[in-house]
Structure formats: structure tokens, C-alpha cells
Image: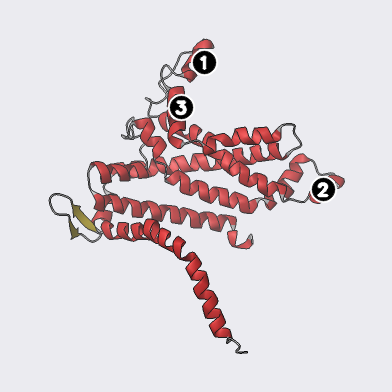
């Protein structure tokens, strides 16, 4: 009986593994890696769509143009403020919901389903619902009138419009992270809490000394995913402002600005430079979060 040499067996196993991965590699390569590299290529060119499509090399001029683009910096500022406001609140809200639903409550499975429903609902549908709530003749102003208070133009005030989107985003995204935290909480042994109670630790002490440290990996995941999601804010801002980023650029985000330059102005080179800048911002923010949470020590 012929024995197969170890290196041939390893080669055969590797080839078999890569064959199984081939469909995924093809999909990711087609719809992820190729667009990324193509965007990098476009960021160094001025693209002309008049007549025959042409690519004129401009080097770093598109990135230099960013430094003098006032709307680009407004979009970065709005996006950063949105992330700084939404990520901590949605994370804290998700932890609160998870702790409540992890307790011994009646009908908690029903409440889990109800709380999770916004996550599986289309973002466009949720945006339209909240537009109706925030409308001058909408539900919120009607409730204020019943209380004897005057209604307000929630979406027409530059100081309030983005905050209205923030509230909606927190409400719709926190349930997803609630499920993540709920899974983490259920992995914590009850014996740890029982030992802490025997030592006289109260509920707050148990939460901060046992619960939070043990769900730290989940918090890191929630914060990183929240940063990525908030910096990519597009659909809600687009629907609330009808694609303009108004009023007075108050709801303008980097993703929306990329859309405007690419598909309204047909300036694909500059739009690609904005996309590269956005990717760099997300990468830097993720690395900062990794450093703060010391994620490498969580495993």
C-alpha cells in the first residue's frame, strides 16, 4: 500500500479548502476588492463622461481640492458629531435593554421580538415613518398640541434636523447590539454573581465589577461596528433632506456628499477621493478604538 507523503497530503487539503472558498473569493473580489481598487484608481484621475469616457491623471489634485472644499469639511464635522453622539448612546441603550431582558421577567421572549423589530425593518421605511412623526402636522406636534404646547418645525431647523436623525438611528440600531450583549450576558456563569452576593456586593457593584468587564469584547464589537455604521450614514440623511443635505447643510454627511459629486455632478474622480478619505477616517477611528479597548488582550 502506497503511503501519501505529508506534503502531498497538506497540498491536497489546501487545494480542497481553497476550492470551497472559491465562490466566496469570487463574490468578494467582484463586489468588494475590485471596487475598492477601482476607487483608488479613480481618485487620482479626472474622469470625463462626455463622448468617449476618458481618464486624465491628476495625481493628488483631488485630495488637495479636499482641503479647500467647505462642504466637505462640513460633512466631516456633521458625520463626526453624529458618530460621537450616537455610538455611546446606542451602546449604553443596548446594554440597558439586554440587562433588562436577561432578568427573570414574564413574557421576555415577546419583548425581545418587539424590541428587535426595528432592526429587521427597512431603513427607508423607518425614515419615512419618522418623517411623518417629525412633520409639521405629524404625530409629535399633535401630541404637543394636546399638551397645550406649540408645534415645531423639527426638520426645518438646522440646529435640530440632525438630532432628529440621531434619535431615530439610536432607536433603530440599538436592538441589534442588544442581542449581541444578551448573548454575552447569558455566557456569564451565575456562580460569579452568587459569590459576589455572598460577599455583600450590591447590584451596581456586581454590574461594574462582573458584568461590564466580562462583556468588554462585545462592547468593543458594538463600538467598532457603530463607528463604521455611523460614518457611512447615507439613506436617512438622503430621505430626510430629499438628497440635499439641508437645511443649511445640517444633515450633510460624507457619504451623501460622495453621492452628490458622483451621480449629480458626475465628478467621479473627486467623489472617489472623498470615498478614500472616508475609508481612512473609519480605519483610524477603528484603530483608536482597538487601542482604547486593548482588544488584543481580550482573547
Q: Earlier in the sequence, mark 2 or mark 3?
A: 3
Residue 78 in view (yes/no): yes
User: Compared to 146, does 118 lie above or below?
Assistant: below
Which residue occupies 36% across, 44% down? 255
Q: Provide the secondary structure element on which disc 2 rests.
A: helix
Residue 144: image location, x then y, percent: 50, 15
Residue at the front extreme of this rendering:
1
Judged by depth in the image, the label closer to the viewer, 2 or 3, is 3
Most foreground residue, 213 or 170:
170
* Placement of the N terminus among the 4 image quadrants: bottom right
Quarter of the image for residue 9 reads bottom right
Residue identifier under label 1 = 143
Residue 56: image location, x then y, percent: 17, 59
Q: CA distance from mark 1 to mark 2?
A: 46 Å
Which residue occupies 20% across, 59% down? 58
* Residue 129: numbered disc: 3
Q: Provide the secondary structure element on which disc 3 rests.
A: helix
User: Compared to 4, does 285 lie above or below?
Assistant: above
- Mark 2 Cα within 10 Å, few/some/many (few <14, many 20+)? some
Which residue occupies 83% across, 47% down? 194
Q: Provide the secondary structure element on which disc 1 rests.
A: helix
Q: CA distance from mark 2 to mark 3?
A: 46 Å
| Residues tagged 1 and 2 counted as in contact (Cβ below 8 A) | no
Residue identifier under label 2 = 196
Quarter of the image for residue 251 reads top left
* Residue 159: numbered disc: none
Amino acid at each position: 500500500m502506497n503511503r501519501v507523503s505529508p506534503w502531498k497530503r497538506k497540498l491536497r487539503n489546501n487545494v480542497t479548502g481553497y476550492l470551497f472558498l472559491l465562490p466566496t473569493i469570487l463574490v468578494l473580489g467582484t463586489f468588494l476588492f475590485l471596487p475598492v481598487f477601482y476607487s483608488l484608481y479613480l481618485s487620482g484621475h479626472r474622469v470625463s463622461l462626455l463622448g468617449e469616457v476618458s481618464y486624465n491623471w491628476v495625481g493628488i489634485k483631488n485630495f488637495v481640492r479636499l482641503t479647500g472644499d467647505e462642504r466637505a469639511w462640513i460633512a466631516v464635522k456633521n458625520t463626526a458629531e453624529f458618530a460621537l453622539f450616537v455610538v455611546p448612546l446606542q451602546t449604553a441603550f443596548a446594554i440597558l435593554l439586554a440587562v433588562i431582558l436577561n432578568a427573570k421577567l414574564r413574557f421576555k421572549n415577546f419583548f425581545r421580538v418587539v424590541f428587535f423589530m426595528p432592526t429587521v425593518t427597512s431603513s427607508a421605511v423607518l425614515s419615512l415613518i419618522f418623517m411623518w412623526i417629525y412633520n409639521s402636522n405629524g404625530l409629535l406636534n399633535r401630541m404637543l398640541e394636546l399638551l397645550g404646547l406649540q408645534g415645531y418645525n423639527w426638520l426645518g431647523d438646522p440646529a435640530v434636523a440632525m438630532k432628529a436623525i440621531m434619535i431615530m438611528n439610536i432607536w433603530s440600531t440599538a436592538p441589534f447590539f442588544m442581542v449581541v450583549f444578551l448573548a454575552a450576558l447569558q455566557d456569564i456563569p451565575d456562580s460569579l454573581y452568587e459569590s459576589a452576593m455572598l460577599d455583600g456586593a450590591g447590584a451596581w457593584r456586581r454590574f461594574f465589577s462582573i458584568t461590564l468587564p466580562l462583556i468588554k469584547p462585545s462592547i468593543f464589537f458594538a463600538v467598532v461596528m457603530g463607528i463604521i455604521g455611523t460614518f457611512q450614514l447615507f439613506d436617512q440623511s438622503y430621505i430626510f433632506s430629499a438628497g440635499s443635505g439641508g437645511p443649511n447643510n445640517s444633515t450633510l454627511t460624507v457619504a451623501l456628499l460622495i453621492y452628490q459629486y458622483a451621480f449629480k455632478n458626475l465628478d467621479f474622480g473627486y467623489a472617489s477621493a472623498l470615498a478614500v478619505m472616508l475609508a481612512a477616517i473609519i480605519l483610524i477611528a477603528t484603530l483608536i478604538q482597538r487601542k482604547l479597548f486593548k482588544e488584543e488582550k481580550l482573547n
